Amino acid sequence: MNVKNTLLTLTAASMFGLVTEVSHQVVAHADSVAAVTAGQAGVPRIDVVDVSSYQGYLTAQDYVTMKNAGVRGIIVKLTEGSTYVNKYAQAQIANAKAAGLQVSAYHYADYTNPSTAQAEANHFADVAQQYGFKSSDLLIDDLEDGVTVSGNVSQNAKAFNDQLQSRGFANTTLYTYISYKNSNSLDTSFVGGDSKVWIAQYPYTPSSDSLWNTGFGMWQWSSNVSFNGISGRFDVSIDYTGMASRQLTAAEALQNAIQIKQESGYLYDGSDQNGGYRWYESGQLYTGFRYYMGTYYWFVNGVRQNAGWRQAWGMTYYTDNNGRAVQGTQVIDGRAYNFGTDGTYYERDLSGYIYDGSSQNGGYRWYANNQLFTGFQYYMGTYYWFVNGVRQNAGWRQAWGYTYYTDQNGRAVQGYQFIDGRGYNFGTNGTYYLR
């Protein structure tokens, strides 16, 4: 959320696995943070977007676009330290409100002791009052900068919060990230405990099936999200408690329902699956394949389905754990299948020496018409003998009414060969059989 300082990136192993925890700085769009597009299937819900001077001027229509993607709240950076003011803040606030979004504000903290914390709180309060924030509006202390770890972090943060409340702002909280909170033993009781705290922690692969930090009020899960039609990347959060995102009024919900009845596509309707999105065709929940975000997804009553076999257009398809139709050679339940590489995605005949991850021959087996093959196949300049797709090495073979022998490398032999102390003639004309 801030572009002032060098990117602070901390990587830590948590109970959830290896994650990257990054500051609110916009330069946190590091390669380690997965790029996400709003409306993308399988990611956590996007309730709240935070903006700073990095995003610059955003129109009311930009915020409407966000709202149509499910966003319900905007958090604007107002101030930093004791003098800085975001020059775009006034327009960002006005246009977000014009779009019907709840608007909150945050201050990027530089304080190192109670006295400087109080000074920064006064600066934040002055600008918040100037821009029309009321006592009930959410004001947030963004506590993440490395300079703030001097002294007693909890005491300094409490001094900031107490001063903000003394200025008449009753709805206050903290933003921080997991490693900062843990390494500084940050006490959050003065804002009502962790259930009131906005926490940041970025999974390498964010998933709606694996929501983190549910004990906190709000979780910022990415700093690398784009919205179709809006330039730039955004920090986004799922708001577990509604602390920064308002619920739709009955009139707004009705208007959304009317709009959905007229539209087609992957639309936000607040459902309890796939982050609130379902696929509509002319207002009707759709069952079948639809092309979206570079591939085909399978929907049942509008809900995206994950791994499974699909029948459509007289063909057979398979969608993976992310719901995407697969291509190429795929191993499913221990067996290989061919779905082509020409953008058609359907299953077709599988023949040849195919990598299917088996435990023999480096993971390769021979398939013929989708079945594991037993017998001779010509490959790499000679014949090899396969049993249930597995290449066999030294041994006698019977095929086509003749006798053959394969060597230690599985290759059918030619010419005069001594096997177990006896000579044999396999010819030299490319026929390989014993004579």
Image (cartoon, grey):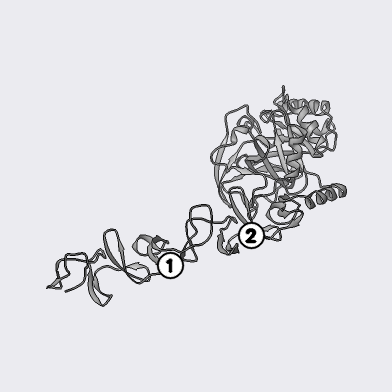
In the image, farthest residue toward the right: 251
- Contact? badges 2 and 1 (CB < 8 Å): no
* Other residues around mark 2 within 10 Å, as few (<14) / some (14–19) / many (≥20): many
Q: Is residue 374 left or right of residue 180?
A: left
Q: Position of residue 91 (x, y in %)?
A: 77, 28
Q: Nearer the viewer, mark 2 or mark 1?
A: 1
Q: Secondary structure at mark 2?
A: loop
Say if 131 sits above or below 38 in the image: above
382 vs 238: above or below = below
- Residue 96 is marked as none
Upstream in the sequence, badge 2 or badge 1?
2
Residue that carries the numbered disc 2 in the rendered image: 305
Residue 167 left/right relative to 1: right
Q: Residues within 10 Å of mark 1 (few under 14, many from 20)?
A: few
Q: Is residue 133 left or right of residue 11?
A: right
Tell me which corner region of the image, top left, top right, bottom left or bottom right, holds residue 51: top right
